[in-house]
Amino acid sequence: MLKLIYFKMRALAEAPQLLLKYSGLEYEYLMSWEHFDDVWQNVKPKIPFQQLPMMVSEDGTEICQSIAILQFIESKAGLSINDPIKAAEAMAILQSAQELFAPLNPTVNFATGDSFIEKRDMMKPMLMSRFEDFDRALKSSGKKYFIDDKPHACDFAVFHHLDLSKKLDETLIVNFPRLEKFIYDISEIDSVAEYLNNRPELIDVSIEPKLIINGIPHPTGVKQT
């Protein structure tokens, strides 16, 4: 079975999990300490590129970097885009979504108090500009999603960041009805809806961020609690 290794945060493992759920591939999600049986500071120097997420294939191959993980999942699930032009367009969307990782993901998962407010206010213009780009791309495609009428890795990557932005400021997305429709369409996919309804809830953002795992609040981070 595939294994996806990450931490206690809602960040770079979200798009891969959404794509895995949509594709129907079986996988196991493990925290770093569960998989490596050691603390992150000891593990980090020993793995490719010294960062997670990491996917472990059935034969034990370690696949790092979230875009590579998404491409692997698409290929394994038979969802790869064959048309080279459309594939390039999808990669452009995926890379553009990836550029939103910092500072959006770290801020939502870890920043508190005045630091959260400062980072939120500083990134708002950038987010609005990128949301305009995504809005324009969706309208230009004339399809349900960015490439066609079925979602691809790029769609789940964008969805994650749009969805996470609501934890930063839920009013940002209301300026883009087409993006709201996109979020709704992704959320209504049965397998995706099941995942979204059952994933650990991210609470106390900007105060003391936590994930509720098996009914217990755990502070976000790379340490076992």
Image (spheres, rainbow, N blue to C red):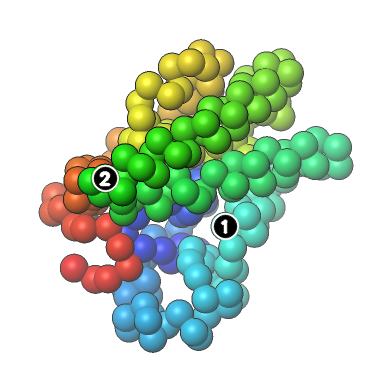
Residue at point 30%, 63% (across, down):
221
- State left or right for residue 215 relative to residue 183: left
132 versus 10 height, above or below: above
Q: Name the residue under label 1.
A: 66
Q: Name the residue under label 2.
A: 114
Mark 1 in CB contact with mark 2 (< 8 angstroms): no
Q: Which of marks 1 and 2 is nearer the N terminus?
A: 1
Residue at point 33%, 36% (across, down):
167
Label 2 sits on a secondary structure element that is helix
63 versus 162 height, above or below: below
Camera-side residue: 184 or 223? 223
**Image coords of residue 213 (percent x, y):** 21, 53
104 versus 45 height, above or below: above
Q: How crowded is mark 2: few (under 14 residues within 10 Å), some or many (20 or more)?
A: few
Residue at point 64%, 59% (across, down):
68
Name the quadrant of the C terminus. bottom left
